[in-house]
Image: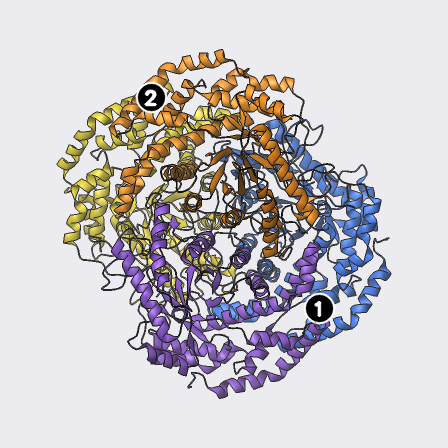
Chain colours: A orange, B purple, C blue, D yellow
Amino acid sequence: MTLPISGDLIADHNDQHAAALDEDYAALGRQLERRGIDIDAIKHRVAGFSVAVPSWGAGRGGTRFAKFPIAGEPTNIHEKLEDCAVIQQLSRVTPRVSPHFPWDKVSDYRALREEADSLGLAFDAVNSNTFQDQPGQPQSYSTGSLSSTIEATRQQAIEHNIECIEIGQAIGSTDLTVWVGDGTNFPGQQDLGKQLDRYLEAASQVYAALPDDWRMLLEHKMFEPAFYSTVISDWGSSILAAQELGPKAKCLVDLGHHAPNVNIEQIVARLHRFGKLGGFHFNDSKYGDDDLDSGSINPHQLFLVFNELVEAELNPRDDFRPAYMIDQSHNVTDPIESMLSSAEAITSCYAKALLVDRDALHGAQEANDTMIAFQTLRRAYNVDVAPILAKARVEAGGAYDALVAYRYSQYSARKAQERAAVGLGAGIV
Amino acid sequence: MTLPISGDLIADHNDQHAAALDEDYAALGRQLERRGIDIDAIKHRVAGFSVAVPSWGAGRGGTRFAKFPIAGEPTNIHEKLEDCAVIQQLSRVTPRVSPHFPWDKVSDYRALREEADSLGLAFDAVNSNTFQDQPGQPQSYSTGSLSSTIEATRQQAIEHNIECIEIGQAIGSTDLTVWVGDGTNFPGQQDLGKQLDRYLEAASQVYAALPDDWRMLLEHKMFEPAFYSTVISDWGSSILAAQELGPKAKCLVDLGHHAPNVNIEQIVARLHRFGKLGGFHFNDSKYGDDDLDSGSINPHQLFLVFNELVEAELNPRDDFRPAYMIDQSHNVTDPIESMLSSAEAITSCYAKALLVDRDALHGAQEANDTMIAFQTLRRAYNVDVAPILAKARVEAGGAYDALVAYRYSQYSARKAQERAAVGLGAGIV
Amino acid sequence: MTLPISGDLIADHNDQHAAALDEDYAALGRQLERRGIDIDAIKHRVAGFSVAVPSWGAGRGGTRFAKFPIAGEPTNIHEKLEDCAVIQQLSRVTPRVSPHFPWDKVSDYRALREEADSLGLAFDAVNSNTFQDQPGQPQSYSTGSLSSTIEATRQQAIEHNIECIEIGQAIGSTDLTVWVGDGTNFPGQQDLGKQLDRYLEAASQVYAALPDDWRMLLEHKMFEPAFYSTVISDWGSSILAAQELGPKAKCLVDLGHHAPNVNIEQIVARLHRFGKLGGFHFNDSKYGDDDLDSGSINPHQLFLVFNELVEAELNPRDDFRPAYMIDQSHNVTDPIESMLSSAEAITSCYAKALLVDRDALHGAQEANDTMIAFQTLRRAYNVDVAPILAKARVEAGGAYDALVAYRYSQYSARKAQERAAVGLGAGIV
Amino acid sequence: MTLPISGDLIADHNDQHAAALDEDYAALGRQLERRGIDIDAIKHRVAGFSVAVPSWGAGRGGTRFAKFPIAGEPTNIHEKLEDCAVIQQLSRVTPRVSPHFPWDKVSDYRALREEADSLGLAFDAVNSNTFQDQPGQPQSYSTGSLSSTIEATRQQAIEHNIECIEIGQAIGSTDLTVWVGDGTNFPGQQDLGKQLDRYLEAASQVYAALPDDWRMLLEHKMFEPAFYSTVISDWGSSILAAQELGPKAKCLVDLGHHAPNVNIEQIVARLHRFGKLGGFHFNDSKYGDDDLDSGSINPHQLFLVFNELVEAELNPRDDFRPAYMIDQSHNVTDPIESMLSSAEAITSCYAKALLVDRDALHGAQEANDTMIAFQTLRRAYNVDVAPILAKARVEAGGAYDALVAYRYSQYSARKAQERAAVGLGAGIV
């Protein structure tokens, strides 16, 4: 393995902070011990946590209005993998990359898998793209994809998804994430019932192509790019579709794909209750699908989501092995920095959820002692878990402060010199 | 039958407007004929439409801050029935009353049914109340009802619902509407999964007590009175609960119980697609569960809902016989006037939905001719259907202009003299 | 003048429908007469109404995910003007075009003005663009524009706005519309107070360059492209900024730039009350700044906005001459068809607002007769004003049914043959 | 002074935790020292912080559906003061009580002030009530109050507010908080412009009665109890009204009175920028004006608000002395416990905002180093400040853990025995 950041640089950085980390970790350990919690046990579980990063997240994102490229952005899957390797090397919680096709198409997928492996990476869920037309593509997705009224268009979308499964098999994935932009912009544009029927019929053909150990993750979204209705608009539509498709179909929750004010942690609990919680796209938002950095806007909500996920781990009603992925649009930051920061925010919430005194919580719930139940959660949320995460990270070979180490490495400046510039333009790619 | 408003008064009123009505009806008829629509056929279907009114809607509503009573408000089920009879007599589209227990409790339900019958009324869905404590009641609903952690409380709620079914059988109902205020105000207050489990277990006992020809209508609501989570918060929770309970359980949609921006007409289409659309509570809202008069804020949304309902009538995938009810809080108007106005608004939307050229619509949808599909809906929406409704109403013995006839009757002033005053206070009863 | 659609074609189309129009107009006239309204007087005022179209609206719009171009889209200001001329020729309510710079840059603005004039068009408010980088531009707007911390960037934005004023003078405009994408994506990214200070300081330099008869229209927007905060996020920020700048600064309302549930018609009333209502960008939306066709989602809200505008006309507290413009993103329709449809929807709402019996309304308001006040509005809203609009349009040389005439003309097919194709890509241009 | 909780009990409690507190405080001190922060200086500023509690908050709250009273609830101002004294005694950050009239009316206000003083309390802003009718009151507020069309009603509301000022002078207040429930439930119900004119005219009469050192705090609210429009619906309406009234009029922000998704911390910055930030009503919410416990739903938002308040302290553009008050509806908890918990949550956010490295933040903002700016805020937010608050509290005579000490005192059980029971009913009082 040849990793992008010098191991010596990381070691030096860690050495500088070793004493401070030991002191903080010990002090927190004593405080937690008074509460009956073994800090090393928590650290051990944190060390076992991981979240995938999306290949496309390594590039600068944009809006429909504009995109402001930065020097050194990756422009192909090889450069993206290199950037993802930086994130994993420093954070030690992002060992997998989730690819998007056709954006990440290559001629040799076996070689791609080896390339990833040599960077300390593996592949996670494969994402299909039927919301965008590609040069030379016979059918346009302007009328939708899996739900289009045009049979040839649906067929093209089905085949693309099946191709994604085949690529996924070659690179070691076991999940196919299906998000479609299908919907309408006008009342009456489509029959809302028949549109879902067509989606279900087409999706069932994709489902039929799944290998035995694969899952199909359905991602719902309230709006954008369609602005009057979307075919899989909410978790209700998603779970009913997953029920119709079969046991390998699960629901994927993107934190930014819901109506205002909705209680997302309860949706997580509901999906788990009915055996259909398949995965997460982590990000944060204030208005719509803003795709901001995880935990940057509402870190408490992220904690409450992880509180449900830890409850689900403890109470795995069905097969519970959610696929976790970061899914953000880095419009104003260095994507590597944003993913380092987001991985830390996500892992922090997991750590805090582990700190919840579950017996006290359940006891207070049973006794309707609302204030104590709430305080039991809040007390865990308030803990500054940075020493636990840093300890786990350093022990795994990562950096005490991933952001500081990254800047110190001057990786970004190096890539700005090496890589071709990206042109102006709008949009997500 | 002794109806509350003089038949002569109605006839006089109608006579005054007969010529104008004939002229307008004829002119609209010619316009529709040019579009290939037979106005008499539409009128015939409009004449067959009806919507229930809630007994409690006859009284002035309030908020948590205040209630401003008006003279002549009904204070018992007998007075409420009388007011409902006025609404039906003038509008001819509200022949059924939906009672709420224990608010409408009486000692002799056979007599109550006869009383209603003598006023030209029948009873619709029975509503249970487990969101409010009653004097002398052994268990408090402060911890919830069907989902409470306290077994005795759940049992009390089950028994109350079963009692509602029994009363309903005595008065001729065949539906039980179950809305619970259960939920939480704090993160952690309850385990979100177990709370639903308890709800489902208790609801299944109510379900088991349903007679063969009865349905149990589950009403979801996003928030209020609980402000962090509610146990049946959205249509997704509602339909999954209904699936678990069995075929007699259906979902009831209240237009004000959704998250901001949600596409409610698509929810209607989804519930119908999966065979679980059971009924409606009509009202309107701008912010939350505002319980404003139907169609007063967003009449176009109401039309789009009826567009789905007419599609469902034409394409009845399962048993499709939705229970329609007005459910509003009349805080600043005479409740009778608001229900007359609302019944008109609702019926208008039904009439407009009937005017949609379904062949043109479906053809444009199939051809992805979005503008024509949209215009096909819009053209129907734009028609002023007042002459059709008035004609149907007058032919059925109702009033040309129900509001004008009602004011002319001075019913309100009469009741203000006859009835006892209502005290100050807040809240809904 | 050489207009794009054959006058004979329009005349033929109108002749086919002349009898129907006369019959419908006469019938509606008799109905309105019974209400004390002179239909010809309404028609006369409708004939005096107009709304500008945006040059960029003639092209297909897109989202950050994709854009689906259509054959025959205009790719320069000359082709856009030609398309706008079609809209005006058929609808007779869109005699002005609002240009956007640098998108519509040409070398000779005098010639451009003459070109527009020869197509029966004039120019409306000029729009500056400091939300997007242009090839070769020295400073990037990645840090914002008028509010950037970088002085050279602010200076570039100021100069661009001043250049827009100069161009506007050459083409006959008297308004500058300023919308900036400035804001933040992270808490802490900028000091929220200082950011506004910089905006105000820079905007005051633009203001200082306004000719005496010009106005500067400030357009607020809640979010997008910035997703945590925007510098002019709401009408409160907008009016305070306009107050600081001076009397020539006014506020422009875009219907899609508000928080969910907000009462936009009251914002209109507030801006008018404080003398700062400068103009409108008409469109519709369900979720965010969806830029859907005007009136397609919530036609009643559009009516209520026009109800305020008609009240303002009757009660012009200050200088009241709002600049009306359509501002939509036509992602799934032919932009010409959408603008024809939108112009009709907007004019309809104006006509309905004119039909409101203002004396009855004000009397009911004074008497707190809420139901009558509401019904007075509703009765006007319910009128199908199509015959009034059609009559006014036909009398002005436009088409009875603009959409039908447009399709019949085969203009779109002709342009698809003549014009160069647009490439794939995302975003708004 | 005879305080309600035994000082010995508090001392015993504190002794039990003294060693743990010292250890945690020292460890945090060392960590902060490494960041260049003196923990004692922060503690000193925290010790100087305070927030008022509302007299009505001491009673159980309710919704329009129901209220579930608890044993021992206070039913008059004397009992409420006693409960508030408990909160202040244990928390040491709530030395003032904000009264509401006529709810807290007594015959002798001098005696009331002495009673409060003997409990270690003073009075904060006086709240008027013109949203509710009182027995025997000549005019009803059913048509609104300060904005009613009925002159006698406006006059009654003006006089009530002036009476509140007079009472306030007797009890030592210097602020009048004015929140009105005025608004409409139907489009057209009132002329939106004239309604504001009437409000402003009436409010100016109240303003004229303010003593020189008094302020009038205007509280805006989006909806409830009015559900179509409210006369002071947002901060824009509030600040324009405050500008018209004069320099003693300021704006008060209630965190639950905004549209969904709105950036409240930016509103705080805007009000401060224009010299009109007068005060806060702290609470939390997920959906509407839920009046949940401060920081229980979105503690990060509360921190961001305090980040602006600390910036404002450092940069006091005008007279900056905001009135802070808790304003919650405690529907499911013991109100004393909720206010103890809320006072802690609020003070925590203040402490965290003090920990922000302002130089680093401003430097990163100037340099457009978005990630560092964000991380500078986030690093302060992540600190567990409990030891700082506990140290300040204990040093001021309060309890190490106020909630534990409160439960240990059995105050609640004692009052349940002593006080009269509260009846069933709905609503807020």
Instruction: From the image, state whether disc 1 or disc 2 is nearer to you.
Output: 2
Crowdedness of circle 1 by 10 Å Cα count: few (<14), some, many (20+)? many
| Residue position marked by numbered label 1 in the rendering | C387
Answer left or right for D20 relative to A142.
left
The answer to whether residue D51 is visible is: no
The quadrant holding residue C321 is bottom right
Crowdedness of circle 2 by 10 Å Cα count: few (<14), some, many (20+)? many
* Most distant residue in the front direction: A212
Say which chain tag 1 marks. C
- Residue D197 image offset from top left, x and y in percent: 48, 58
Closer-to-camera residue (C192/D391): D391
Closer-to-camera residue (D342/C41): D342
Whether residue A199 is situated above or below residue A298 in the rendered picture? below
Say which chain tag 2 marks. A
Q: Residue at x 22, y 58 (%)?
A: D422
Whether residue A209 is situated above or below residue A191 in the rendered picture? above
Query: Which label is found at residue D405?
Result: none
- Residue A147 image offset from top left, x and y in percent: 63, 49
**Amino acid type assigned to the residue bearing label 2 in the image:** Tyr
**Amino acid type assigned to the residue bearing label 1 in the image:** Pro
| Residue position marked by numbered label 2 in the rendering | A25
- Say which element carries label 1: helix
* Most distant residue in the bottom direction: B8
Answer left or right for B68 relative to A208.
left
- Residue C156 image offset from top left, x and y in percent: 66, 31
